[in-house]
Image (cartoon, rainbow, N blue to C red):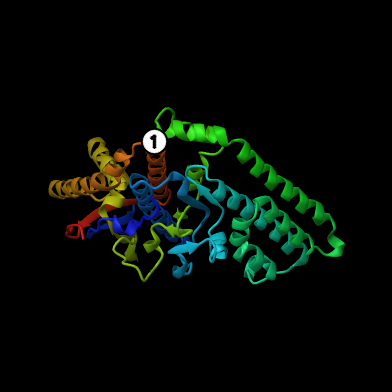
Amino acid sequence: MNNFNDKNIKPKFDRLLLRLTQIDNKTLSLWNVTDLISDFGEYYYKIDLIHSVVNALNSGINPKNIIIFDRSINFKYNSYVLTKLSLEFDLIDIYKLGSPVSLFPNKMINDFRIFFNLFGKVTKLLHDIQNHTILKTYDNPITLKYLQNVYKVYKSDEIYNLINEFVIASKSQVPENAEYAYELIINLEKEAIRQINRFSEKQSEIKRRANEIVQNKTLIPISEDEYFYHFFQTLDKIPRPIVGIYNNESEKINLLCSYHFDESEDNSFLLILDKITHKSPYLIDISAVGWIIAPIFSFWIGRLMNRKKDNMDKDLRCIELNYLKEEQIRKIYLLVQDLFNENLGKDLLFLETKYFQQNFNKSLSLIVSRFVESLKTYAFEIIDIEEKSFSNNI
């Protein structure tokens, strides 16, 4: 199966309004508040991203064709780029997203990851010693030749020849007074070739491990496997990674959750800052899709009940909630939790491969705990939730 569009499988619901307030007198700068909101955005985006990847797997997408890039996307990135990217025509834009890593090892993706890394290191070296602008402007002939046209060359030739041609062209750019760069470039070339050879040598082991994972014969600890942990490592490490699905027939990469960055898209899933006021304490109103923030609700309700039990409200200077308010929040929580269970929760359970189920759940827990730590760092608490009339699926 090649065709998958996550926009078609996402249920649309009306939103919840969350109110956050600062619960002590800690002085915050504008950057602190911005960081907190950014952390919430990272949490929100990643939860939705995991949902899309899990749906893709449940829809029969080959794990070898699910790709994550190792640079955090800039929210100001041109939205027209964030749809479908052609390997033949859009390789420069693909390079800007970072080095690709596939969920299951994929020779072509591995080749491009190695080539992108080589390209980045060599052009940075040339930039440093020549003070030219290859890396910054992407309009130097070398860049156009070896990025814009590299896929055509890759399809018609071996990766070794592609690397060799690039290295020869790069060495021709080295000034006469910087001959030391020759050796550096040659060493980078050797390392790239070593990585390619090692991947080829490991093919039998990679196939065996992939079969064991699919057949649930092993869960393979992420940190102990050379070729199967990179995807989850990147997902956990990069704040706003881009994930896409490669279509073998069209030779294009369909980027998931692009509606988070494209203002022309339906914005019913976006995290929206409704209001922020600073009247001692700070108050921040954020509207969001309910099921995406359900894990945070779970944490918050737990703290609320513990605080009630331990009579800590006065110490934490948190707003006291009367019985009816508490019951109202419980009602909303149960509704939101049901929505979560009917979406990402259900889809995680439907994953036939326990390895994916285990590791996506780990990533989910890590994402939640990081945002919780962010709330603690800046001494913020969720103090109110307003239900905004949930609708049926559209």
Q: Nearer the viewer, residue 252 or 365?
A: 252
| Amino acid under disc 1 | Gln
Residue 143, x across and y down, in percent: 66, 66
Q: Is residue 89 above or below residue 201?
A: below
| Number of residue marks | 1
Q: Residue furthest top?
A: 217
Residue 68, x across and y down, in percent: 48, 51
Identify the residue at image location x=41%, y=35%: 214
Q: Quadrant of the C terminus?
A: bottom left
Q: Is residue 116 left or right of residue 11?
A: right
Q: Residue furthest right?
A: 177
Q: Nearer the viewer, residue 250 or 45?
A: 250
Q: Secondary structure at mark 1?
A: helix
Q: Is residue 315 left or right of residue 118?
A: left
Can residue 15 be seen here?
A: yes
Q: Which residue is mark 1?
A: 358
Q: Nearer the viewer, residue 83 or 30?
A: 83
Identify the residue at image location x=81%, y=55%: 182
The quarter of the picture where residue 368 lies is: top left
Residue 62, x across and y down, in percent: 42, 46
Identify the residue at image location x=63%, y=53%: 115
The quarter of the picture where residue 25 lies is: bottom left
Q: Is residue 315 above or below residue 123?
A: above
Q: Nearer the viewer, residue 389 or 51?
A: 51
Can residue 279 be seen here?
A: no
Label 1 crowd bin: few (<14), some (14–19), many (20+), radius 10 Å: some
Residue 118, x across and y down, in percent: 67, 53
Q: Is residue 99 left or right of residue 32?
A: right
